[in-house]
Amino acid sequence: MKLILAAIGRQKSGPETELLDRYLDRARKAGRSLGFTQIDVIELMESRAKSTEERKTQEAEQLLKALPSSCYIIALDEHGKHLPSPDFAKIIDRERGSGHSAIALVIGGPDGHGPALLKEAKLKLALGAMTWPHQIARMLIAEQLYRAMTILTGHPYHRS
């Protein structure tokens, strides 16, 4: 199974990108034994439409077009669920055996996700009540993917 981190906007070089790459590399290595064959990063351009709704609609279309048709979509959304790491790991584990071709964690543009993407998402997930820059949100998701892999491989979880 493949994992996908899809986002509107480009990640610029800097310490956040170095940390993102480090956690993605760790997650890839830890995930191999669990049957996760790869972790792809998809970056798409922000819409230049004038209205917020038009931008969200265009970006949602881009994201949906870029994702495999049979993937399990997790939309990062400020109104989403707040999950502890072990529960996030359980979802990754459950979907690993579900027949989906991939699990996609999707970060929208500055305006959020369009209705079409939210409708297709099987889970809406929040990273807390605070607002995070997209570069940091990517890094946080990569860290949680790594943490999920370690939990699923039986590494002791310090909060248990």
Image (cartoon, helix red, strand yellow):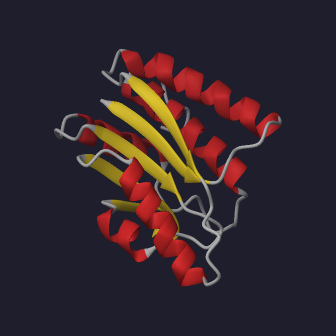
- The residue at the far right in this view is 14
Q: Quadrant of residue 81?
A: bottom left
Q: Is residue 24 visible?
A: yes
5 and 60: which one is in front? 60
| Spot occupied by residue 76 in the image (x, y as percentages of width and height) | 50, 59
At x 30%, y 36%, the residue is: 93
Q: Quadrant of residue 152?
A: top left
| Spot occupied by residue 24 in the image (x, y as percentages of width and height) | 57, 29
Q: Is residue 155 visible?
A: no
| Spot occupied by residue 50 in the image (x, y as percentages of width and height) | 65, 82
Instruction: Please identify the quadrant where the N terminus is shown.
Output: top left
At x 61%, y 73%, the residue is: 111
| Spot occupied by residue 89 in the image (x, y as percentages of width and height) | 39, 40
**Label tally:** 0
Does residue 27 lie above or below 137 as drawn? above
At x 35%, y 31%, the residue is: 2
Q: Quadrant of residue 141?
A: top right
141 and 153: which one is in front? 141
State left or right for residue 130 relative to residue 160. right
Does residue 21 lie above or below 54 as drawn? above
Does residue 7 lie above or below 24 as drawn? below
At x 19%, y 34%, the residue is: 97
